[in-house]
Amino acid sequence: MRYITVFILSLIFWLLLTFKLTVPNIIVGAVASLICSLIFTRFFISNVYKLLQPHRYFWFIIYLVVFIWECIKANLDVAYRVLHPAMPIRPGIVKVKTTLKSDLAKTLLANSITMTPGTITVDIIDDYLYIHWIYVRSEDPEVYTGLITGAFEKYIKRIIE
Amino acid sequence: MNNMISLIFITIGILFNLLGCIGIIRLPDTYNRLQAATKCVTLGCCSILFGVFFHFGISNAGIKALIAIPILFLGSTVAAHALIRGTYHFGIKLGEKSVKDDYKDAVQ
């Protein structure tokens, strides 16, 4: 079942990318998707039936809106720090605990953090994320955990777990 | 009308790219430069691609521009993570202004 899902998804991706509905194109795409699904299925999510649950897509759209808003804020924030003559930066690497369990959820959280105000994920070791922050707002672990992961963790938990 | 929207998006994109470039020159160390390189430049490129989508509409080039946005997002975040982790393991110190380094204990 996982193989079929990966095959269908990569075939749709191929058709969107080439944007041509002719028979030779579909045959080439099918062969390429078959090779992809044979090699890459082991990295795909283990329970594909989660893809059929509509409420996950609903939370995904809400997450996307929150994410784009945070992304725009991040850009303006970094742009302000760059253009300010005194350059108000206070960089450092902080350690943040996450409650998410699965690998895919952690990856999504790390990617979202990389896109939010002045933070880049350096590494993930077990349940801890190491994050480089351009302006360390607080020294208290609980406060900065809330500042960094608070906006995303609850949505990601609803989307994936 | 579509032309107007696409022009606005492309202008915003070029502006953010310019800010990212200024950041790469002005900020003091590698870690902070990566911040400017990922954030400003990614939103800049996404904005330009969105402008391209509005210019061409739903056609061959427009759909390709729209597909490129999520790929660029995932690609640039993973690249930034790989670069910053590689920099740390290579042994480059954090800049003088840094106030905190929790990662030091984890590496050893």
Image (tube, coloured by chain):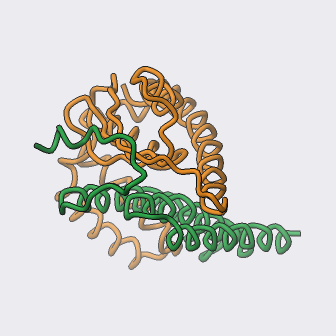
Towards the viewer: B64 or A112 = A112
Q: Position of residue A10 (x, y in %)?
A: 36, 59
Quadrant the N terminus of chain B occupies:
bottom right
Task: Single out the residue that lies furthest toward the right.
Answer: B1
- How many marks overall? 0
Position in image of residue A20 (x %, y %): 52, 75
Q: Is residue B105 left or right of residue B37?
A: left
Instruction: Indicate whether A22 appears above or below A147.
Output: below
Residue A53 in sight in this render? no
Who's the residue at 23% across and 61% down the image? B86
User: Residue at (10%, 43%) from the top-left corner?
Assistant: B108
- From the viewer's perspective, is residue A80 above or below residue A30? above
**Residue at the left extreme, as displayed:** B108
User: Residue A129, percent across and down?
Assistant: 31, 36
Name the residue: 37% across, 64% down: B30
The residue nearer to you, when weighing B87 against A15, is B87
A74 left or right of A51 in image: right
Residue beneath the point at 57% across and 31% down: A58
**Tint of chain B:** green
Q: Please name the color used to draw chain A.
A: orange
Residue A9 seen in render: yes
